[in-house]
Amino acid sequence: MNQNNDFKCQIWFTEYHNNNVALSVRIKDILYREKSEFQEIEIVDSYDFGKVLILDNTFQTTERDEFIYHELISHIPLFTHPNPKRVLVIGGGDGGTVREVVKHDSVEVVDFVELDKKVIEACKKYMPKLSCEIENEKVNVLITDGIKYVAETENKYDVIIVDCPDPVGPAKGLFEKEFYKNIYKCLDDDGIMVQQSESPLYNLDLIQNICKYLKEAGFEIIKPYTYPMPTYPSGFWSFTLASKKHDPLETDEKKIKEKLKDIKTKYYDEEVHKGIFLATPKFLKDAVKKALE
Amino acid sequence: MNQNNDFKCQIWFTEYHNNNVALSVRIKDILYREKSEFQEIEIVDSYDFGKVLILDNTFQTTERDEFIYHELISHIPLFTHPNPKRVLVIGGGDGGTVREVVKHDSVEVVDFVELDKKVIEACKKYMPKLSCEIENEKVNVLITDGIKYVAETENKYDVIIVDCPDPVGPAKGLFEKEFYKNIYKCLDDDGIMVQQSESPLYNLDLIQNICKYLKEAGFEIIKPYTYPMPTYPSGFWSFTLASKKHDPLETDEKKIKEKLKDIKTKYYDEEVHKGIFLATPKFLKDAVKKALE
């Protein structure tokens, strides 16, 4: 194929949000497309966002903005835990989360549970900036359903990261009561979990439900945090952290700073660690408080 | 016109960013359109973002997400200053910033300088949720060029808010060296200014320039802060604060909390005040540090 990027031809990928808002990126080329057992997978090369992974017509990750998402889903829980050794990553077949997790020297084992091996294969081939650590010796790739995995495993983890897609189709169970109970069971007594929890602007009730379920599962500390995410609906996104013991607001800033000498980040630093929770918008804090009453 | 909102007809407003990314909202109706002396002004009614003010084909403000922008451009400087009495607002003809500023009891005078009176008139008629305080007795509407105003006035202010559009056309001078010197001159000895400063993802060099110019103008404390802004390019936006004396990180949280009993906010609270600066992404802190060296 002619890879000359100066074609005038306007080819766009568009994701529609609720049929009333649309985000489009102009693309240079379609690099990969396949229907797997679970979903339609596309990787395109875009003009302004680099390579883009699209699952079922939805922006999944892009080379330009992925650092925001992957640093914040990983380093917040990993620096909150004083000594994370065993980490479970559910979802995130692109490998971006795993890439950040293995940056922590304390981490000995990363069990990486992904439903769709075709996503891993495609990203290994076309998005090496994200998938570069999937072959790391600390990482065990387990091709299976994360919901089933946490229900059945007897393994215990220090940190569990749920890098899940939107709550539709097979991912729906990743937002249900039973799942959070099993996550709690799979965590050590001072374990921490983080989950991708959608847009505070569009999905406030979903975040409230997650918080309620996490409380019912037994977690002591439950805090969502927000950040800009250019290619996700509303560009305004959240993770929800749940912890049995350690509070991210009490993490020693100096210790983070010391460890960050060996870990390269672009978004996260020792101030972001605490600031991101303080900066949670009032309406979200209020909604969570109400959900946890 | 038939105001039935259930038409199947798909009418969209689209803003293109750098010709390679596009954000579109589906609209119900075009409420207003006019070419003023300075720009093309449109107000449309959209499905998911309420009424939208569009200037020269660019999202200016929407009813759904304006609270983020207007609360953060106003309350951060106004709560950083211990007793703001005289406030200058440059731009922001929709009235959203003025609406937040007059919530502060200490504020006695708001000089509201807007270049284009047609924007004020249109928003007064079609966007009363934003323009509702333009007639407030504290507010003096001055239809003139903000650049010229700060060069010529002998008035002094406690807080100056530059609620400017993108640095193109007549707004270009709002991002130039001379302007910041005049802003400095118009501020009291413990004055504070805040300016809309574009996307940290797309316009990092612009933010660096602003910081450099602010330093040259004489400001002691210069800090950008970021937040999600769904309808602006990249959904990731910034303000830059410059202060002669008061540091927002040193504001007494209890005093903010006390004052907030009388001020209704949706995004801002006493934790956001400090957290938003700490949560500034590392790459932006690094870029600013470099610019200020």
Image (cartoon, coloured by chain):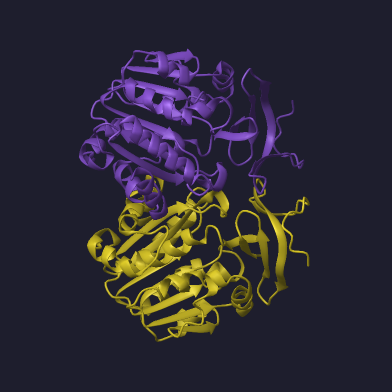
Chain colours: A purple, B yellow
Please determine whether, in this image, residue A227 is positioned above or below residue A3. below
Apparent side of residue A46 relative to residue A201 in the rendered image (left or right): right
How many marks do you count on the picture? 0
| Foreground pick, A175 / B84 | A175
Q: Residue at x 74, y 28 (%)?
A: A2
From the top left corner, tell me how far across and down residue B71 is, in percent. 43, 63
Q: Residue at x 52, y 25 (%)?
A: A94
From the top left corner, tell me how far across and down residue B225 is, in percent. 39, 55
Assign the C terminus of chain A to one quadrant of the image.
Answer: top left
Assign the N terminus of chain A to one quadrant of the image.
Answer: top right
Please determine whether, in this image, residue A136 is positioned above or below residue A184. above
**Residue A273 appears in view:** yes
Please determine whether, in this image, residue A120 is positioned above or below residue B243. above
From the top left corner, tell me how far across and down residue A248 is, in percent. 28, 39
Q: Quadrant of residue B118?
A: bottom right
| Foreground pick, A109 / B271 | B271
From the top left corner, tell me how far across and down residue B271 is, in percent. 31, 55
Apparent side of residue A244 relative to residue B135 in the rendered image (left or right): left
**Residue B219 appears in view:** no
Apparent side of residue B179 relative to residue A86 in the rendered image (left or right): right
Q: Residue at x 39, y 43 (%)?
A: A225
| Foreground pick, B104 / A102 | B104
